[in-house]
Image: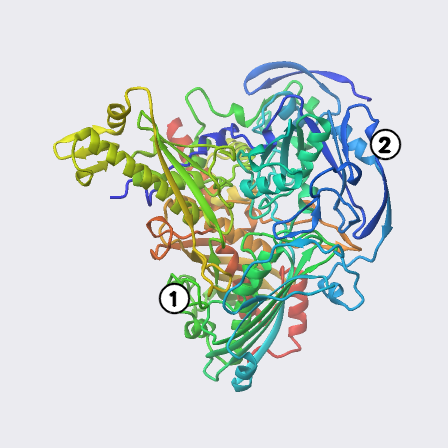
Amino acid sequence: MAITIGHSILRFDGPDKVTGRALYASDVRLPGVAHAKILRSPLPHARLRHIDASRAASIPGVVAVLTRENLDVTSPYYGAYIKDQPIVAVEKVRYVGDIVAAVAATDERIAERAVCEIAVEYEELPAIISVEDALSGTAVIIHDENPARKDPKYGYGASLIPHASSNIFYHFRYERGDVKKAFEESDHVFEETYDLSSAQHYPLESHVSVADFQDGQVTIWSGTQTPFPLRQEIARMFGLPLSRVRVMVPYVGGGYGAKSGIKYEALAVALSRLAKRPVRLNLSAEETFKTLCDPSARVTIKTGVKKDGTFVARHCEVYLNGGAYANSGPTVTERAGYRAHGPYRIQHVTTNCYCVYTNTVPGGAFRGFGGPQVSFAYESHLDMIAHHLNLDPLQLRFNNLLDKDELYTAGNIPIDCDLRSELKLLAENIGWGKQDPESRIRPGIKRGKGIACGVKDGGGVNKEANAVVKILIDGSVILFFGAVEIGQGVRTALMQIAAEELRVKPERIQVAPIDTAYTPFDRGTHASSAITVMGNAIQAAARDAREKLMSMAADVFRQPSSTITLDDGKLFAGEQSAFIHEVMRRHFGDLEGEILGIGRFKVSRRDDAPLGYPATFWENGLAAAEVEVDEMTGVVKLIKYISLTDAGKMINPLHCRGQEEGSVLFGIGHALYEQLIYRDGQLINPNLVDYHLPRFRDLPRSFHSIILEEGGGTGPFGAKGIGEGGTLGAAAAICNAVYDATGVRLYSIPLTSQSIWAACSKNSETPKEGD
Amino acid sequence: MDESLIPLRFLLNGRECNTEVNCNELLIDFIRNGLGLTGTKRSCDMEICGACTVLLDEKAISSCSVFAFEVDGKELLTIEGLAGREGLHPLQQAFIECGGFQCGFCTPGMILLAKSLLDENPDPSSEEIQDYMDANICRCTGYQMIIESIQYAAKLIKSKGA
C-alpha cells in the first residue's frame, strides 16, 4: 500500500517560507560583496561608436567597470541555441534595455551614479519593432555577425529551413500528407488569423546573480531554473574547466520560464573577476521586464473540412516576434510549430513557424512554451468552423479529437489520456447547452459559454536527469538531485517517491540543496518535466539503494536476497527482522559507511520522432468559461471557470491543484490583461502600475479545477507533469464564450474592454458566423 | 553625500530597538540591510505588489514606499516576529496546510496583510478576503488556495480563542 504517494504531505519548504527564513539568491550576503548596476541602451538599434568609462572608474567606491574594452573572455557571446547575445554590447545595441556596460561598487547607490557617468556615442540605426517590418525587403539585418549556432537533428516530417541574410532566425516546418490536394477535395476551407500580445513572466523575485571569481575558480549563487546549462555556459565563455565553476541555487522566487538558461550570471562573473571580490547583481522590476518575454505571435490557420465537419487538412503559418536575441526562441518556435495543428485527427498538415529578430525585448521560454499561442488560434478557429457548419462546437470537437492511444504524429508516444471523456466531463460541469436563467435579466449584459481543449508534448526533449539517494548509517536518507524548487513543490514530491520506494517515513528523508559541485547532472527544471524525468531518476536511485540494502540484509541475516522484504523502515527475512540502521550497523560497524543509490533517466532518441525524441507524456489543458459581457462598456466578467487536466497519478494532490490553478491564472491574465506595449521603440509599460497582473479581484466568480488521474503517465506510479496545461485553454475558452454571448469573434488577445466595445459596436452592422 | 543620521526608537517584533538611520533610507532597505531581516521581500518597488508588506502599528504598509525614520515611536512587525514561542501563528500553519504559497516570495507580505485583515475582521467572507487581499500579488497559486488558507486560519484562531 502506498505510504506517501497520493497524499498531500506537507511541504518541506513550508516552515522556511512562512517564517521568512527561506534564503533566496536575493538574500545571499557575502563579506566584501560589491553591488552591480547596468548601463542599458536608451536606443532600440544603434552601432556603438565610442565608450568612455574613465569618469565612472574614478568615482570613489567603484571597484569595477565592465565594457567591451575590458571583457577579456574566451567568448563574449551566449545563448541556448544561437550564440548571439554578448555579456555587454560589442558592436551594436539591439533593443532599449540592451546591456552596454556595468559597474560594481561598494554601495548600490554609488554604482547607480557611476553608471550615469559612462559616456557612450551611438550611431543610430533604423529600429524594427514588428515582425512585418523585420520581414520587409528593405529591413536592416539585426544580426549581421553570423552567430554560431547548434541546430537539432529532426526526424520524420519536421525540418529546419535556413534563411540567409534575413531576420528570420529560426524556421521550423512540419508536414505530412498532401495539404494542397486535400484543400481542393474539402467541402469547405476556412482561414483566419489570430494575434497574441507578448507577455511578461514577472517572477516576484527579479533576476539575481551573486558571483565570486577567485584564483580561476567561480562560485555563483543564482535563482536559475537550469544550474547545469548555466555552469556549461560560464565555463565555455571564461575558458574554464567545468569543475572550476560551481553553481548554487537557493530558493527561487518564481520562474515560469524566465529563469531558464543563462541570464546575468556571466556579467556578474566578469565584474567579480575585475573587482577581485564577490559581486551581487539584483535587477529592478523594470529590468526584469527588459530581460525576457513571451514572444507575441501571429497565427494564420487554414482548415479544410468535409460537410459533416470532419477535418481533412490544416495549414498553419506562425510568426513569433523573437526580439533582439534568440535566447530559447528556437525551441519555442519548434514547439509552437509542432503543436500548431492541435489534438485532432487531421491527415494532411503543413505548419511553418518562424521566429524573427526585432529590436524588442528578447522572447523565449514562458509557461506553455508556444502552446498558448497556437491553442488560442486552433480552438477559436474550431468554434468558428462549427458555427459556419451549424454544428455544436462541442460535437465538432468530439468528432475530430484524437483517441487515447492514437498517434499525434508518427514517432511520438500516443495520446495518453481520454480527451473525449475529459471534454464531456468539462461540458457537464459548465452546464453546456443549458441556458442560465439569469442570462436575460439585465439589459445590455449578455452571457455566454465557451470551451477549449489543448495539448502539449510534455517533459522536454533530450533531457538527461541523474539522482543520488544516500542511506546513512542511522537509517535516515538524503536525496541529491538538480530539479530546482521554483515553487512547484518538487522537493517534497520527489521525496515522496523515494519514501515510497524505500518504505521509510517522509520525515526520515532530507533533500540536499543544489550545488553543482556535488549534485548530479540535470538538464533543467522546465517543460513540466521534473516529476517524470527527474522522478524516474530518483525512483531508479531509490531502487538501487534499496537493492543494495536488501543484499546487505541478506548477508546480515544469512538468508537468500529473494526472501528479504522491506517495510516501514524495517527489513524482514522469515522470523528475523531489524531496522534499516541495525542492518547497516551490523554490516559496516557502528560509525562507518553509507549506501549510495544511483539513478539516471533519459528518453531515448528515435530517428522517426519529428523532434528527434518522443515526448515523456502529453500535457493537456481543458477550459470552460462562462462570461458576462457588457456591450456598452466592453467589460468582460468571468462568471464561472472550470479547468481540467490529467495528472496521470497525483503524487501530491495539494501541489497538483496549486500548479493547475496557478497556470490557469497565467492563461486568464494573458487572455484579459497582459501585454507589453511599445511606442517609438520604447517599451512603455515595464512596471506593475502599467502592466496588469491578475489580482485577487480578477478571480472568476466561481473557479473550479478538476484534476484527473488516468494513470497513463511514464513517470513514477503513472505520473505525468502538470503546471502548464492551464495556459492552453484559457484564451480560446474566454473568446468562444464572448462570441457565444455577443456574436462577436475576437481575433486578438488580450481582450481589452476597448477591443470588445469596438467589436460589439461594429458587429451590430455585420452578420454572425454561420448566418 | 548629503546624508544625516536620525535616531530611531521603536518596537521591532515586540522588542525595543534603539538605532539610527540615514534620513533618506527606505524602510525596506533598513529592514533587509540594517536589521538583517531578509524575510521582507523586494519586488515591484512601487507599492503595487505587496511583497514588502510589514505591519506598522498593526497597519499593513509597503515598506518600499516609506522612509525608515517613519517607524520612530511605533511598533514594527515583520514576518520574523509573527511566530510566537508556542510555534507558528495560525496563519502560517494554515498557509502550509492549505497550499497558500508556492515559490514563497510573496508569502511574508501576504501573511502579514492577512493578519491585518483578520485583526480587523475575524470572520471574513470569501468576497471580503478577495477585496482586502487585492492589495497584494501572487504569481504562483492562482489565489484560491490563499483565500482558503485565510479562511482556515480564521477558524484556527477562533477555536484557539474559544
| Labels in figure, total | 2
Quarter of the rendering containing residue A29: top right
Could you tell me which chain the residue with mark 1 belongs to? A
The three-letter amino acid code for the residue at tag 1 is Lys
Label 1 crowd (10 A; few <14 / some 14-19 / many >=20): some
Q: Residue at position x 41%, y 48% from top?
A: A601
Whether discs 1 and 2 lie on one chain: the answer is yes
Q: Residue at horizontal 78%, vertical 38%?
A: A67
Considering the numbered disc 2 on the image, is that residue within a helix, a strand or a loop? helix
| Disc assigned to residue A424 | 1
Residue under numbered circle 2: A54
Residue B102 relative to residue A40: left or right: left
Observer-nearest of A22 and B150 = A22
Q: Quadrant of residue A107?
A: top right
Circle 1/circle 2 CB separation < 8 Å: no
Residue lying at the far left of the rendered structure: A575
Q: Amino acid at mark 2?
A: Ser
Residue A586 as seen in the image, left or right of residue B3: left
Above or below, B41 against A168 in this view is above
Does residue A502 sit above or below A717 in this rendering?
above
Q: Which mark is residue A638?
A: none
Q: Position of residue A387 (x, y in %)?
A: 52, 77
Could you tell me which quadrant the C terminus of chain B lies in?
top left
Where residue A98 appears, as percent x and y from the top left, is 74, 46
Q: Position of residue A737 (x, y in %)?
A: 53, 66
Residue A568 shows up from this direction: no
